Image (cartoon, rainbow, N blue to C red):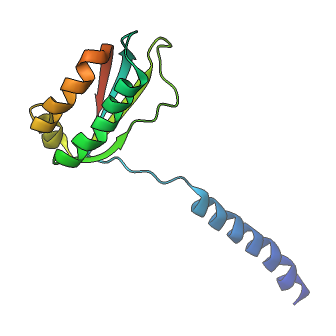
Amino acid sequence: MKLLKTLSIPVMVAALLVAGIAVAQNKFRTPQSVLHVITVKWKADATDAQKQAALDGVKKMAAAVPGITNVWVKTLKVQPGDYNAVIAMEFKDAAAFQAYADAPAHKEWEKVYLPIRQQSTTHDVTN
């Protein structure tokens, strides 16, 4: 009986350790959505109000373009260092991303964005 008690404690500890590892394992997905990431260098004479209007315009556009599911406009870090902002949009799928280019709301947003953009790069990714 004493041997059984002595053996059961290590077995229970091992079981809890295994259960803890299984619970702590990171879980992730590989969605079919499309991420569209734009890095922006504003023109030197672009005002803060113009820049903010362009960023706010992303949210307005997202509300009007079917298939945009999420937007990010608060830049934490951008490379190369002479760029000023990052804009990211998530589309539900490749078809929504393709339709976005010709969407009227996108064309309206470009009227605010393009005049103050000196240069930009885009990165598009999916699974």
Out of 79 and 4, give the one closest to the viewer: 79
Q: Which residue is most to the bottom?
A: 1
Out of 84 and 15, give the one closest to the viewer: 84
Place of residue 126 in the rendered image (x, y in percent of width and height, measured from the top left): 28, 37
Place of residue 66 in the rendered image (x, y in percent of width and height, measured from the top left): 16, 48
Q: Quadrant of the C terminus?
A: top left
| Residue 90: quadrant of the picture | top left
Q: Quadrant of the N terminus?
A: bottom right
Relative to residue 8, is residue 125 drawn left or right? left
Place of residue 123 in the rendered image (x, y in percent of width and height, measured from the top left): 31, 25
Relative to residue 72, is residue 81 drawn left or right? right
Q: Is residue 12 above or below residue 116?
A: below
Q: Please name the residue shown 38% across and 10% down the image.
A: 45
Q: Is residue 81 above or below residue 91?
A: above
Q: Please name the residue shown 17% across and 46% down the image.
A: 64
Q: Is residue 25 above or below residue 75?
A: below
